Image (cartoon, grey):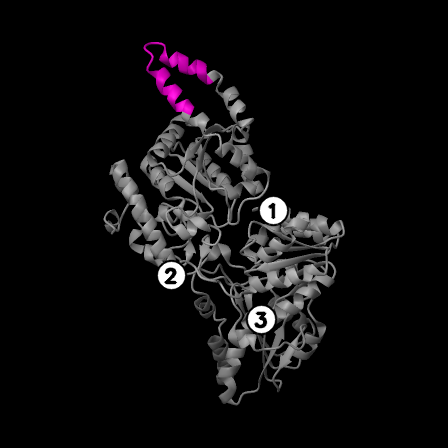
């Protein structure tokens, strides 16, 4: 039963008034609220369950919003939202017009910086700290960074700048041994090594307290011991990368011991310099299902909290992973790469089957490295298939151009979560990849509308040349689209007459089919063009479209630089004098249920139907 959380306007000021017994009760209540809310709304569960105590401790010790917290990644900030005057709206988490699942300054004065992509928090926190310093603001800035983010290169660029700057900056490493999938690589092993060396920190506390009690000479003894502190640490840790960057290192600390956390945060405040606080947490703690399988409970749809998450069923990601696994059985040159998203991109079957052969690679949250690594595998004669979410692939654009496309290496890209992604909101919408690929010469892009399209196009991508991307949406195939068998992947024309034609690609084909169903009793001549191989643009499509009086192009991607603009430009250059209407996405897309997002963007079947009726009404 909730008692403390009855205060629906809970604020950091309330936390400061509570004793440790009350705060520990609060932590238990928060865990119950997290499980209740995420089971109903979906969201990131395991990471937030592990962040409860240290978030409470941060608000006990620091003074937000004067002191600013930057979350990396922002999906671990649910507890922060509960404690910062948003408890009364927490049931709207990830809902349309509700609380974001990430930190968002436009939502609350307590959110310092947007952080939907990993690795940016130290850069952002350092910038905020320098801004405070230049304006004589004595507030603190705290970067809360997950250990998975330390596989991202920007972290080290930021530490290199911030560590020896003398700026009052505190970095909290939430080390749970995972990012989304279990961490891979040398840094993960390094953090494991430090996690097993807690004896140093505990011993230091005992010795410092004892020496401080020695009359008259206690402080002098502490200073003398501090002079050899670094050498003692090196004996225990072998080395400390964080101190090498210039940070004062505190830790590892039990991330679920509230009182110790507060003591360490107070110490970090007193140093007034770059400080690195290393805390050890357990992902999913407090909910047995999540503790036993934190990867499965990282990002979830709504579920029955008493039974846990059931089987996820078929999805574009799963079909991609199974199809690739089947192809790799008969082709030992195929390798698969992911950036800390093995489960999310459907590559678990591939990893289980081929990791022992050395053909599966998880680069961690290092999308740029993954792209260059894939290009080099191709240069060495392999066929790399790099599966990555569309929103994260944006980070690899430079490497795509200079390391892969320039030398025409054959790399296959599985662009997952392309188009609108729903309740993850602005930072995760996959709406920019087509515009990116369009800038490259001689690139091939497939955009399957259903599982059958995906199963057919992936082998083509494997056997093709150069950069080949297969982009597919989040979730399941549309029911109407699932029944459709594509005849011509370059351009499938259906319908008769030359009056109105609807043109689209990818998931929106299901919406077009819905519009056509609605139009059946209107006695209108409406045709449609389904494009699966969207790049390069097929000249035959252009020639046939020239004969239509009205072309309506629908695109689940950014309008500027998108495919529709190219079709319009080519048609005009060829002398097209009919009406061309383009409806794409013109702005960042806020969180909402997937179908509602399409309705709001007027990309749903009913909106397409209404556009057709409007054309007829205007005549």
Judge from the rendering whether residue 115 lies leftward or rightward of residue 407; answer left or right.
Answer: left
Closer-to-camera residue (526/147):
147
The percent coordinates of residue 144 (x first, y second) are 44, 40
Residue 205 shown in magenta? yes
Q: In this figure, which residue is indicated by the disc labeled 2?
A: 304
Residue 218 shows which numbered tag? none
Closer-to-camera residue (154/167):
154
How far apart, in angstroms, are the residues tagged by discs 3 and 1?
A: 29 Å
Q: In this figure, which residue is indicated by the disc labeled 3?
A: 450
Q: In this figure, which residue is indicated by the disc labeled 1?
A: 363
Q: Is residue 428 above or below residue 27?
A: below
The rendered magenta stretch, by its main secondary structure, is classed as: helix
Region of the chain picked out in magenta, as a range: 203-226
Q: Which callout, 3 or 1, points at the residue further toward the start of the chain? A: 1
How many residues crowd mark 1 within 10 Å: few (<14), some (14–19), many (20+)?
A: many
The percent coordinates of residue 24 (x first, y second) are 29, 41
């Amino acid at each position: 039963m909730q008692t403390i959380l009855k205060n629906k306007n809970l604020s950091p000021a309330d936390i400061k008034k509570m004793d440790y017994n009350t705060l520990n009760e609060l932590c238990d209540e928060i865990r119950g609220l997290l499980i209740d809310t995420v089971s109903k709304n979906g969201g990131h569960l395991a990471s937030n369950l592990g962040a409860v105590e240290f978030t409470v401790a941060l608000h006990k010790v620091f003074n937000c919003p004067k002191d600013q917290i930057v979350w990396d990644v922002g999906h671990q900030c649910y507890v922060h939202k509960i404690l910062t005057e948003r408890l009364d709206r927490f049931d709207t988490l990830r809902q349309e017009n509700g609380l974001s699942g990430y930190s968002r300054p436009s939502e609350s004065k307590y959110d310092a910086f947007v952080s939907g992509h990993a690795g940016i928090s130290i850069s952002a926190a350092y910038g905020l700290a320098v801004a405070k310093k230049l304006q004589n603001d004595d507030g603190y800035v705290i970067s809360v960074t997950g250990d998975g983010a330390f596989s991202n290169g920007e972290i080290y660029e930021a530490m290199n700048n911030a560590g020896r700057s003398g700026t009052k900056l505190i970095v909290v490493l939430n080390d749970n041994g995972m990012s989304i999938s279990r961490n891979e690589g040398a840094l993960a092993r390094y953090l494991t090594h430090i996690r097993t060396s807690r004896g140093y920190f505990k011993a230091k506390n005992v010795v410092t307290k004892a020496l401080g009690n020695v009359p008259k000479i206690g402080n002098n003894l502490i200073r003398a011991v501090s002079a050899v502190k670094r050498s003692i640490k090196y004996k225990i840790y072998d080395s400390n990368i964080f101190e090498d960057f210039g940070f004062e290192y505190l830790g590892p600390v039990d991330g679920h011991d509230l009182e110790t956390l507060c003591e360490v945060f107070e110490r970090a405040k007193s140093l007034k310099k770059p400080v690195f606080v290393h805390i050890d947490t357990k992902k999913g703690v407090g909910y047995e299902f999540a503790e036993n399988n934190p990867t499965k409970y990282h990002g979830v749809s709504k579920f029955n909290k008493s039974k846990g998450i059931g089987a996820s069923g078929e999805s574009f990601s799963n079909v991609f992973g199974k199809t690739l696994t089947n192809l790799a059985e008969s082709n030992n040159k195929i390798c698969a790469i992911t950036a800390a998203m093995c489960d999310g991109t459907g590559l678990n079957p591939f990893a289980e089957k081929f990791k022992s052969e050395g053909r599966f690679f998880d680069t961690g949250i290092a999308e740029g490295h993954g792209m260059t690594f894939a290009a080099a595998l191709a240069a060495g004669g392999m066929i790399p298939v790099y599966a990555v979410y569309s929103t994260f692939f944006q980070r690899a654009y430079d490497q795509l151009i200079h390391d892969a496309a320039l030398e025409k290496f054959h790399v296959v890209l599985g662009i997952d979560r392309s188009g609108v992604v729903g309740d993850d909101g602005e930072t995760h919408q996959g709406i920019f990849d087509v515009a990116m690929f369009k800038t490259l010469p001689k690139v091939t892009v497939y955009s399957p509308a259903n599982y059958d399209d995906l199963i057919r196009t992936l082998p083509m991508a494997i056997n093709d040349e150069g950069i080949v991307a297969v982009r597919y949406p989040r979730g399941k195939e549309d029911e109407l689209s699932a029944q459709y068998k594509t005849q011509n992947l370059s351009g499938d024309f259906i319908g008769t007459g030359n009056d109105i034609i609807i043109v689209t690609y990818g998931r929106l084909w299901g919406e077009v089919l819905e519009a056509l169903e609605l139009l059946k009793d209107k006695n209108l001549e409406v045709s449609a063009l389904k494009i699966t191989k969207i790049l390069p643009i097929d000249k035959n499509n252009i020639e046939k479209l020239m004969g239509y009086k009205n072309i309506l192009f629908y695109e689940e991607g950014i309008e500027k630089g998108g495919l529709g603009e190219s079709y319009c430009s080519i048609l005009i250059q060829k002398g097209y004098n009919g009406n061309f209407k383009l409806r794409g996405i013109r702005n960042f897309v806020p969180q909402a249920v997937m179908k509602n997002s399409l309705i709001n963007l007027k990309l749903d079947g009913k909106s397409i139907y209404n556009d057709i009726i409007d054309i007829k009404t205007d005549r």
